[in-house]
Amino acid sequence: MQVKSIRDRVADRASTSAGQHLDALLHKAQEIAREVVAPATEAVDRDARWPEAAIRALQQAGLGGLVVPAVYGGQGHGLLALARMCEVLGQECASTAICFGMHSVGASVISANATPDQQARFLAPICEGRHITTLSLSEAGTGVHFYLPQTSLESLGAERYSLTGTKTFVTNGGHADSYVVSVVAADPDAPVGQFSCIVVPADAAGLKWGQPWDGLGMRGNSSRSMELHGVEVPHSNLLGKEGDQIWYIFNVVMPYFLIAMAGTFLGVATTALEEARKHLMRRYHAHTGSSLAQTSVLQHRLGTLWGVLERTRRLTYHAAASFDAGEPDALMAVMAAKVEVADCVVAMVNEAMTLCGGIGYRSGSRLHRLLRDARAAHLMSPTTDLLRVWIGRGLLGQPLLSD
């Protein structure tokens, strides 16, 4: 019989402890989803309302610092925790899930190379539930190439920078306390993808917001345009060094963002499947009295849907856990997980609506909202098509950012 080493036994205990800690946090999230998120979901969608009550409840429960390292006062979790947390929230409200997810992505970017000053000014209040942050990367004209910002960063001397440009689809726009903004590297001849990230406070002079978000789905995201007109911020708000953010793309920004989206849309897909299951359980044929649940062809279709959802969920969990463990091919798995989830959620909601018939198709039904939300899975950058290109390049040993 093989006896485990002391190191292996310590690792097992640490893994068990981390799992128990995550379970406790997920239990808190489930309570919030049931008691705070669910009652507000209809209004969030109807009125395009940012889910403030839910976000504040998550902060008060200590979940704002979910992915912030414990040494900085956070919960110390990684991608697997983020995937599962967004999945729990996404089962009730996709907008709430992605708003929390984007806060977590922003927090992870700040945490990656935080200075002691940044720890005190940003990470401490994030972990204490007093600060919401978010990413601000997308721009009109660069399409899915979020790693090619045009917003300029100009040094005004030894202490301050000036930022000028326009960002689009800023989730939590107008509600966050700070924004992690991508800006073009100082050197105009810098390689593709070489840009900087800097934290811009919400009350910075010269920061203006575009029209309120009015999307087809994901209506509570507050994904607004941000205009930066000579916004001045201190040098101490720069994350890392000027032009080094290519490292952040593949080590922080993309994996956390992709997993937040994957978890969110797994939640949407799970709810769609449950809507179809409940419909089949409660509907009967008037002429025979038999339940739809007794119809073999419907049993077959529901079973097929469950298999698609479960294998997609397992891929997502595996990809997240692999990245947390530092496995070399984990990023490929993370990209594949987001691709598969996007395909899964659209197919799942479509098929659930077919199984539910006219009841599911009517305006205002739960599936009506889920279908509008699900469609965003393919559109949110990096898009499904771009990720498939990157996966192919990776398999062929080619640079991912070759164009």
Image (cartoon, rainbow, N blue to C red):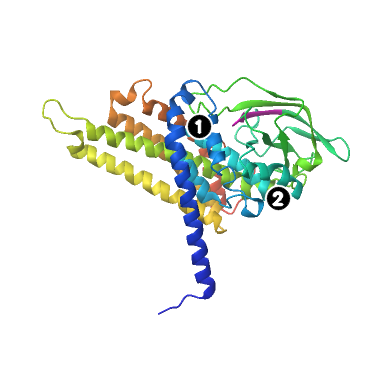
x and y, in percent, of residue 95 in the image: 50, 32
State which quarter of the image contains the C terminus: top right
Q: Quadrant of the N terminus?
A: bottom left
Q: How many discs mark residues in the rendered view?
A: 2
- Residue at (70, 50) in percent of width and height: 113
Give the residue at x 44% y 40%: 31
| Residues packed near mark 2 inside 10 Å, few (<14), some (14 to 19) or many (20 plus) | some
Give, as a three-letter code, the residue at label 1.
Ser
Give the number of the disc on residue 95.
1
- Where does the magenta region start and end? 166-172
Secondary structure, mark 1, is: helix
The answer to which image quadrant residue 286 occupies is: top left
In the picture of the structure, the residue carrying the numbered disc 2 is: 113
The amino acid sitting under disc 2 is Asn
- Left/right placement of residue 79 relative to residue 33 reads right
Whether 171 is among the magenta residues is yes
Residue most extreme to the left = 288
Magenta stretch contains residue 14: no
Give whichever of 54, 251 is nearer the camera.
Answer: 54
**Residue 367 screen position, x and y as percent:** 37, 28
Looking at the image, tell me whether mark 2 or mark 1 is earlier in sequence order: 1
Residue 91 seen in the current view: no
Q: Position of residue 136 (x, y in %)?
A: 65, 34
- Residue at horizontal 55 percent and vertical 27 percent from the top: 50
Q: CA distance from mark 2 to mark 1?
A: 29 Å
Residue extending farthest bottom: 1
- Residue 268 point in image, percent of width and height: 42, 36
Residue at 51% x, 49% y is 81
- SS assignment at label 2: loop
Q: Is residue 124 above or below residue 168?
A: below
Chief secondary structure of the magenta span? strand
Residue 5 seen in the current view? yes
